[in-house]
Image: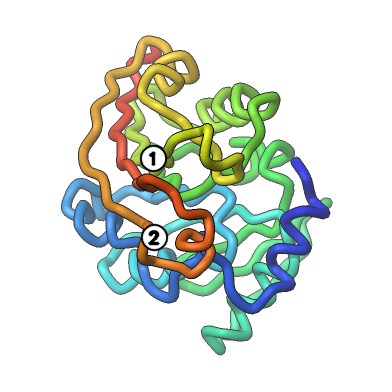
Amino acid sequence: MDYEFWDNCWQRPSQPFHVESAHPLLSKYLHLFKNDRRVLLPLSGKSLDPIFLAENGLFSTSIEFNPTAVESFIADTQLKPIEKQTNQFEHFDFGKFEIWLADFFNLSSKVIGKFSQVFDRAALVALPDDLRNRYTQHLISLLESDAVIYMVTMDYKTAEMDGPPFYINLKALQEYFPNSSIKELDRISLLNNHPRWKELELSYLDEVLYQIVLNHE
């Protein structure tokens, strides 16, 4: 994990990967989530998805390693969580959702429990190739055997842009999540979402939502 890179990113006032509302693909496919089960939001940044989920009756657990992102989330929302230090982790209890300020790879199911549904809006695509397999393996260790992952990936011509966000297609997901059922649910164009994308003059830039159903025993 390039901590310095992401820390520099969060110091800037505007980020192309951050939106000032719930992710549109989460909003569109909210009906697929089960209200009686927690939602895991890995590498959540200062996403407003936890608030959106709470407003719709779903409890979420966010994990973010960058203090600036978590501090910005609290400052921007003006919420007042109950803060508790747990070993090397900081836990923020907002009542209807929680945020862990921690290295994702250091949090185990013994600390945060296991999950049956995940919304990965920008975690896997933020990681370089040498960390992606480690990330997916650790993510699976936090999940029930029949968990469902809703994962947002990026599709673009790799000759036109280097990540992050990194290009990840269906074939790569099948390698990261073997013995799983994977299908594309939707895609949306990002070309007009932020000045940064326009500067790059890309042929296309799509966010793609995949549904990954684990079939591990």
Where residue 188 appears, x then y in whole percent?
27, 51
Is label 2 in contact with label 1 (beta carbons under 8 Å)? no
Question: Which residue position is annotated with label 1?
Answer: 151
Q: Is residue 69 visible?
A: yes
What secondary structure is marked by label 1? strand
Identified at 77% across, 53% down, the residue is 5
Vertically, is 68 above or below 44?
below
Nearest to viewer (mark 2 / mark 1): 1
What secondary structure is marked by label 2? loop
**Mark 2 vs 1, N-terminal side:** 2
Residue type at tag 1: Met
Identified at 44% across, 39% down, the residue is 115
Vertically, is 29 above or below 104?
below
Question: Which residue position is annotated with label 2?
Answer: 59
* Label tally: 2
Where residue 212 appears, x then y in whole percent?
33, 29
Q: Residues within 10 Å of mark 1 (few under 14, many from 20)?
A: many
Residue 54 vs residue 213, the one in the foreground: 213
Residue type at tag 2: Phe
The quarter of the rendered structure image containing the N terminus is top right
Q: Image check: 150 left or right of 27?
A: right
Q: Image check: 167 left or right of 131?
A: left
Residue 18 vs residue 211, the one in the foreground: 18
Where residue 138 appears, x then y in whole percent?
60, 28
> To which quarter of the image does residue 59 belong?
bottom left
